[in-house]
Image (cartoon, rainbow, N blue to C red):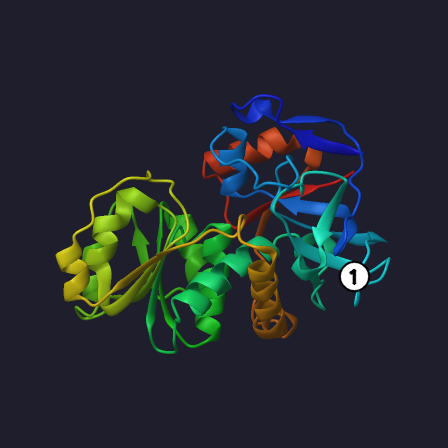
Amino acid sequence: MYAITIPEPGGPEALVWGEVPDPVPGEGEVLVEVVASAVNRADIMQRQGFYDPPPGASSYPGLECSGRIVGIGAGVSGWSVGDEVCALLAGGGYAQKVAVPAGQLLPVPVGLDLKQAAALPEVVCTVWSNVFMVAHLRPAETLLVHGGSSGIGTMAIQLAKAVGAKVAVTAGSKDKLDYCAELGADILINYREQDFVAEIERATGGAGADVILDNMGAKYLDRNVQALAVNGRLAIIGMQGGIKAELNIAALLGKRAAISATSLRARPLAEKAAIVAAVREHVWPLIEAGQIRPVVDRELPMSEAPAAHQVLEDSGHIGKVLLVAP
């Protein structure tokens, strides 16, 4: 088969489309013939040499895919060759085939085509696990999403609105904020021109955000704590703004607030399977009812993964960038 490899860390040009051995499904795994994958920030970090795959995972980038099952390993039940699926991966999505633990498979939602489904697994599992399973966002609470026009952001807006929450977003342009508003965002903050702490305080009458979904890490830590409501929950899922920052413990104590930091990729299989099962139970009906949809910015051939990475690095997208396998 062909896959994107990374012979040496570097810029987008470090991604090389070449022939590699076919994967073989192990016990509890299925083999998926990939139709499409999607680009995530974690793929960029891996390409740069900062985010190695967990032990035993494929060395090729790609944390989600859609496709058809073409092989089934020992001990797998409930799935058949020919089933159309999408999957959460620890790696290997930028390829024509990938071996996937059966617990990380999801059926393609009714009403979506197979390519569109590739835009779902990583973002839905990330948002559901952090915003709902960890931070316990409730109806009528306020969620602040940094990077509202990203793949994660566009899904977080829709899910939060579906449960009756109020949504604030930050983004870097009017076009992106306008799109967030179309998805249901209530409070629009241009981080290039406005202070999100002041804007959240104004929009909530001084109460603050009950939950903050943060992709920036160190750069926003202090201001995120300032923006939290009493009993607020800060969920950190990225470190685009650095890895080290000083935390004002007194401010955190004063708000009786909580900070969580999670990633999906290196979690044990049982934990990932539990998240996938929760997503299938709670989110898939919303997608099939038309309340939530994947937002796809563009599709590119998988061999053009360098160009797709450049799009993300330039922040020239809204929603997900898909890579379509030949």
The residue shown at (47%, 34%) is 313
Q: Tell me which amino acid carries mark 1.
A: Val
Q: In the image, residue 9 lies at what x, y percent? A: 53, 24
Which of 257 and 108 lies nearest the eye of the viewer? 257
Percent coordinates x, y for residue 43 in the rendering? 55, 38
Residue drawn 64% across the image and 41% down it? 56
Q: Which of these two is toward me, 32 or 295?
A: 32
Q: Is residue 274 left or right of residue 76?
A: left
Relative horizontal placement of residue 20, taking residue 152 as reference (left or right): right
Find disc 1 in the rendering and name its residue.
76
For the point 20% across and 44% down, the residue is 246
Query: Quadrant location of residue 101?
Result: bottom right
Quadrant housing residue 284:
bottom right
- Disc 1, SS: loop
Left/right of residue 124 with respect to residue 260 in the rendered view: right
Is residue 200 visible in the rendered structure shown here? no
Q: Quarter of the image holding residue 302? A: top right
Percent position of residue 239, x then y: 38, 42
